[in-house]
Image (spheres, coloured by chain):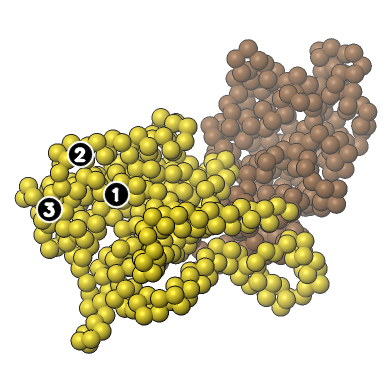
Amino acid sequence: MKVNTPPLVEMRGISKSFGPVRALCQVDLCLQRQEVLGLVGDNAAGKSTLMKILTGAYQPDEGEILFDGQQVRFLSPHDSRALGIEMVYQDLALAGNLSVTANIFLGREPCRPAMGRLLPLLDERQMDDAARNLLQKLRINIGSVRLRVESLSGGQRQSVAIGRATAFNASVIVMDEPTASLAVREVGKVLELVKSLRGHGVSVILISHRLQDVFAVTDRIMVLRHGTKVGDKPTAETTMDEVVGLMVGARGDSLEEARAIATAG
Amino acid sequence: MRLSADRILQRLRKADGSAQASFERRITVGQFLDTYGIILALVLMVIALTILQPKYFLSVENLTNVARQTSVNALLALGEFLVILTAGIDLSVGSLMALSMVSLAIAVHSGVPSVLAIGLALGLGLLGGLLNGWGLTKLRLPHAFIPTLAMLNIARGITFLISRGVPISGLPPEVRVFGSGDIPIIQRSDVPVVIPVSLVVVIVFYFAFWLFLTRTRTGRHIYAVGGNPQAALYAGINVDRVLTLVYVLCGGLAAVGGIVLAGRTNSGYPNAGTGSELDAIAAVIIGGASFFGGRGSVVGTFVGALIMGLLRNGLNLMDVSSFWQFVVIGVVIVIAAYTDVLRRRSLRV
């Protein structure tokens, strides 16, 4: 492993408060290229807040973000998207009344000039072809890209949301609870998709309550508790029990002790 | 035509390349019928009315009359459709129409050249729409019902104030043409066929907005905002700008309706359009748009307005009391809305 290559994403000393509530306290995060990082923690541990800071929806009170070794400031989700950081939201953020193609290109629809450049019209054919190629590349099985998203199953919708995140040369995809409301059979397909993203050169941060999924697809697991990082280990070197223990502080450790153990180990 | 996602997937597993293509075509047809099935309803209604009144209903003269009478509602309905697409509503279109109409008449009587007077009328409609949109997006009033209800009253009040409560009659021919002009098509003496200019106005605007909604980026964004405003926001769409735009366009179309009505009645009268907003909304709902937003088509709205116009006309020809017509229209609205309920239920996989 080359020491000189900087991590793809580095967050250092991130702190964030909402009024009197300390959501995050000096959190560090490190994401390598082509790595799947699991971000776990109990409710209100700060996982979503940390990711919203990464995507630019929130600004940190303290700390800095580095992308590919360069310091960056994200003032809005546009800024992070411009660098190839995409987010798949927990509620998918899909418009059910629109087709798969329309959803994939929502907000970034390519146009072709008509009537001698006076009238920019949607380039439907280009979008449909690109959408079909995308789904094929990711081995997502949906009958037609013209189908309205509302007529798809939960797993298919999740796949479309993930597909949308990969459609624009993303380098980092953040997924918030991607398997939370899926049937058992569909979970397997989505996890396959997540694993295949690495092969396409994309790094993934996976937020999930389902530890069996986290252990199935991630390379490393980072644990947050009450806004503090209490664990950061390669998946192969830890167990589900240990992770749960870090999440809830089952061994009676105080936060400081837990953090000391985590950084030493 | 209801297609179950599971049945589709089963068929797909046995599918090869060519079956895939025909499957795609069938899906698009299914979705197409979903949106445009209303045309079937129209055709059935026309057949029924023709059977009941064969001598008069399908005559050229009668249909031309229907076209003239329906054009104003069709224009208001088009604007209302845009707004309902975003899960909003505009209760002020009748008042904005009256305001435009009366301002047009007053301007013309004050010596303002016709073109400028028409421009003023349009401008007032657009401005009213802008204020409606701002009420929603800047004042963050909880539902479009409120700013447009306020505008209904404010615009109507201003209309009465500037007209002093009396109609202003007499408009120059270049203004009248929009409402009462006719374009001769066939000159044969016994059956002259004309196309009313007002119908041409309707067709031009409907075509333009069909193009806008189905083929441009902003049109797509309007559907997105109606379907899932949060998703639109995450996608980087300026939801407030889209919302304001539809109200502006709705106000503008109300003004166009006012110009056509002024042409037809050769006047501007302050009572114009009282209750028209409800007819416009009815046409949109009958045309298949969903109150929850994101669903419906320009063609559907046109058919909705047509159904209302033909229904009233047909009932008139059959000498049915105009009071019964109210009842019939009400029942048709329920039928149309219930079809939407059934459709939504069938989609719940």
Q: Amino acid at mark 2?
A: Phe
Which corner quadrant of the image does residue B13 belong to?
bottom right
Rendered residue at 30%/63% (across/down): B69
Location of the N terminus of chain B by quadrant is: bottom right
2 or 3: tag closer to the N-terminus: 2
Left or right: B156 in relation to B208:
left
Left or right: B184 in relation to B227:
left
- Residue closer to the observer: A8 or A214: A214
Numbered badge on residue B306 = none
- Residue closer to the observer: B330 or B223: B330
Chain under disc 3: B
Location of the C terminus of chain B by quadrant is: bottom right
Colour in which chain A is drawn: brown
Q: Which residue is mark 2?
A: B160
Left or right: A167 in relation to A123:
right
Secondary structure category for the residue under label 3: strand
Chain under disc 2: B
Chain under disc 1: B
Report whether mark 2 lies on the same chain as mark 3.
Answer: yes
Give percent across and percent down for residue B327: 45, 54
Which corner quadrant of the image does residue A251 belong to?
top right
- Up the image or down, A196 lies above or below B207; here it is above
Numbered badge on residue B169 = 3
| Label 2, residues with CA under 10 Å away: few <14, some 14-19, many ≥20 | some
